[in-house]
Image (cartoon, helix red, strand yellow):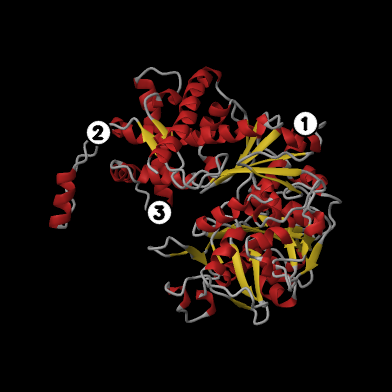
Amino acid sequence: MSQYERFVLSCDVGTSSVRTALINLRNGSIKSNSLITDCSIELFTHPLTMHMEQSSTNIWKQICKSCNKSLQCSNTRPEQVVGLCFDATCSLVVWDVERNKPISVSLPSCDGNTVTNEEEVRNIILWADHRSKKQADEINNIKHEVLNYVGGKMSPEMEMPKIKWLFDNHVINLENEAVHFFDLADWLTYKCTDEVSVRSQCTTTCKWGFVFDECSTQKNIICNGWNIEFLKSIGLEHLVQPSNRIGSSICEIGRNISYPLTKQSAQELGLLEAIPVAIPVIDAHAGGIGMIGAVLNMNENNTKDDLSRTIVIIAGTSSCHMAVSKDPIFIDGIWGCYRNAMVQDMYLNEGGQSFVGALIDYVVESHPKYFELVKLTYEETKELNISRLKKKVYLKLDEILELLRKQRNLESVDFLTRDIHVLPHFNGCRSPLADPNMRGVISGLQTLPLNTNERIYEIVHGKETQLIISRLLDFESLAVLYLSTIQSLAYGTRHIIDEMVKKGYNIDSIFMCGGISNNELFVRQHSNATSLPIYRMDEDSMLLGCAVLSGVACHEYPNMFDAMKHMCHLNRKKDVIPQQNTQEYHQKKYSVYLKMNKDFIEYREMMK
């Protein structure tokens, strides 16, 4: 290994785990053995309230563990690491900056306040926590101009409704000036640099109601970039007056802006003191940077103007649908436009689905045939690892769908769902309806054998019955429902794209990343349902996005476009092109999907 080989350390903090890797500054490749993915984050849930909380102390501990393992497992010397950047979920962190301690976000009646050590203090409200629905509705009813930048409505997944909930329920005293509020990525940067006032333009514009727009008419009532009139209207003016607790130094991403790593954090992470810490981003937006940068390498003549012709989908537990434009575009039900939130000097529009991978798992695992299929898969594979066994169950479902296609002499598995239709809003619709009260619908169910007597016998006698394992084709209802659920999510994506196109976008491709982008059925159905080609890459796009920002922050590249050109590359062997023979079918299914949305809203109105 050359002594001149240099790396940046990328850290991705997801909902359930921390991932770190060392990224080569010259070509964007991950150094061998440096990718660490086994550091889990604790998630605390309250069964009665469905509140979801985490501990920043626990997360920091796992980050330090993962970073040190990246260095050790790859035989990398600390002096080879010349930059650091974080991405994280858009979860809310509450911190006492005077005592340097976490502040609990749990209700007094919940067990989150009874703690024996700092790691047990639940000072983070998880992004997916919807406790602040009421507060989000109250904010939206004010109809302030700031809401134009979030598609007209704030989501309970955003930070202002969460802070208002803490205030309304007397969990936090906003008059205590030591109480500061951070997006998780910003808190991690504060932890590393001691810069309490610094925030990312990505986090603040996308999740906090900070408006950075050269076209804004509200400049005369902005305090340190925050709209005082808006904050007063929702009862949160204490956040910026008399002192600012949500950030007074809002920094653009993708610039040569960074802050030095402190001695203490350097020691804990295993890095050198004073290396530059780049301005952070939300996890999905890091993936967007890593993916969209590859547009510049698809054609030697491509420029940043070509970035506007693609939509990036980060598909995992939830999904984000992100597109950028040169000029501001406002779209009802779709967040943005956000200037400099993902790509410098461009505006971001962001759609999304709150329940994607989680919905597929729920629909499949709640089916009465699921555990029979698990047993069949185990007997064939003898796989003992639960996670790997569950993945093989999905491969078995793909196999069943193909058997059904052949049995019925169909051109494509797509056609198996003619009689079953799904509305995927089991946890509300983030985009483009912006309606957290939407719910899921399954139309076209049939009865099937439940084997209830055998299951009751097993419970009563405490021993397993010798159930006859069904043939593969007996799992038809499960396999077809699995396929129809994926298709419904694809129609949700098409709905988002259609709304973007109506307002001026010219989208001709999808760039997809995230855990479910490895599910070939999921990718194929999205390509067929949207009539768009889908492109993917080998490297982890979120870690790569962090590396792009680090590369600029440590002055390896003059701007993020130059960094993306050198570091972001597609694997063209993974391209998926839409099948023309399925287009008419999916148009019909999409029409059903749109009608089901209208019908559900009508049913809800009838029941008021």
Residue depicted at 47% across the width and 36% down the height: 486
Q: Amino acid at mark 1?
A: Asn
Q: Nearer the viewer, mark 3 or mark 1?
A: 1
- Count of numbered marks: 3
- Tag 1 or tag 3, which sits nearer the N-term? 1
Q: Amino acid at mark 2?
A: Thr
Q: Tell me where residue 414 sits by quadrant.
A: top left
Closer to us: 242 or 380: 242
Q: Are marks 3 and 2 in contact (CB under 8 Å)?
A: no
Q: Report, in whole angstroms, how far the alpha carbon at label 3 lies from the one at label 2.
A: 32 Å
| Left or right for 323, reference 132 | right
Q: Which residue is mark 3?
A: 385
Question: Compared with residue 497, is residue 170 higher up or lower down, i.e. above or below?
Answer: below
Is residue 423 among what the camera can see? no
- Tag 2 or tag 3, which sits nearer the N-term? 3
Give x and y (percent) for residue 185. 66, 61
Closer to us: 264 or 440: 440
Q: Which mark is residue 299?
A: 1
Q: Tell me where residue 364 sits by quadrant.
A: top left
Instruction: Give the secondary structure at mark 3.
Output: loop
Question: Compared with residue 182, is residue 372 higher up or lower down, i.e. above or below?
Answer: above
Q: Tell me where residue 60 sits by quadrant.
A: bottom right
| Left or right for 377, reference 27 | left
Q: Report, in whole angstroms, how far the alpha carbon at label 2 lies from the one at label 1.
A: 52 Å
| Left or right for 299, reference 451 | right
